Amino acid sequence: MTIVLLLAPFSLLLALTGLAAFWWTIRDGQYDDPQGDAARILDDHLTDGPDRES
């Protein structure tokens, strides 16, 4: 029974920490342009490496 009294507040604290982190990402603008990110991944001309020789 003692373990329940220890783990219950710990789990609530962990859940509140996760919720705070999620709220922080929303306020930071992490999810503002999901369509642009999805399209950007498919572009071949946006590579960071050296040019490919044809």
Image (tube, rainbow, N blue to C red):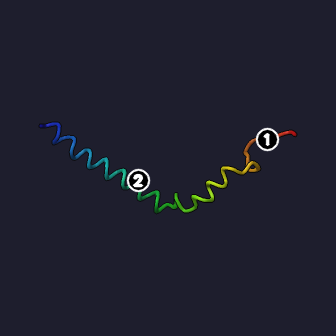
Instruction: Say what amino acid the circle numbered 1 marks.
Output: Pro
Q: Amino acid at mark 2?
A: Ala
7 shown above or below 25: above
Residue 2 falls left or right of residue 45: left
- Determine the secondary structure under disc 2: helix
Counting other residues with Cα less than 10 Å from the Cα at mark 1, is it few (<14), some (14-19), or many (20 or more)? few
Quadrant in which the N terminus appears: top left
Return the mark for residue 6: none
**Residue 33 spot, x, y in % from top left:** 58, 61
Q: How many marks?
A: 2
Q: Residue at x 63, y 59 (%)?
A: 36
Work out how far the residue at label 2 is from the one at label 1, CA to CA, in angstroms.
Answer: 37 Å
Residue 49 location (% of width, % of height): 75, 41
User: Which residue shows up at 22% across the image and 41% down it?
Assistant: 7
* Residue at (52% x, 61% y) in the render: 29
Among the two numbered marks 2 and 1 on one chain, the one whose residue lies closer to the N terminus: 2
Seen from this angle, which residue lies furthest left?
A: 1
Residue that numbered label 2 is attached to: 21
- In the picture, measured across the screen, residue 21 lies left or right of residue 31, that is left
Question: Which quarter shows the C terminus?
Answer: top right
Above or below, comparing residue 50 to residue 28 in the picture: above
Picture coordinates of residue 8, whole percent (x, y): 21, 45
Q: Are marks 2 and 1 in contact (CB under 8 Å)?
A: no
**Residue position marked by numbered label 1 in the rendering:** 50
Residue 46 spot, x, y in % from top left: 73, 50
Answer left or right for 43 relative to 9.
right
- In the image, residue 33 sits, relative to residue 15, either above or below, namely below
The picture quadrant where one finds residue 48 is top right
SS type, badge 1 = loop
**Mark 2 neighbour density, 10 Å: few (under 14) some (14–19) many (20 or more):** few
Residue at the extreme right: 54
Identify the residue shown where x is 67% and y is 54%. 40
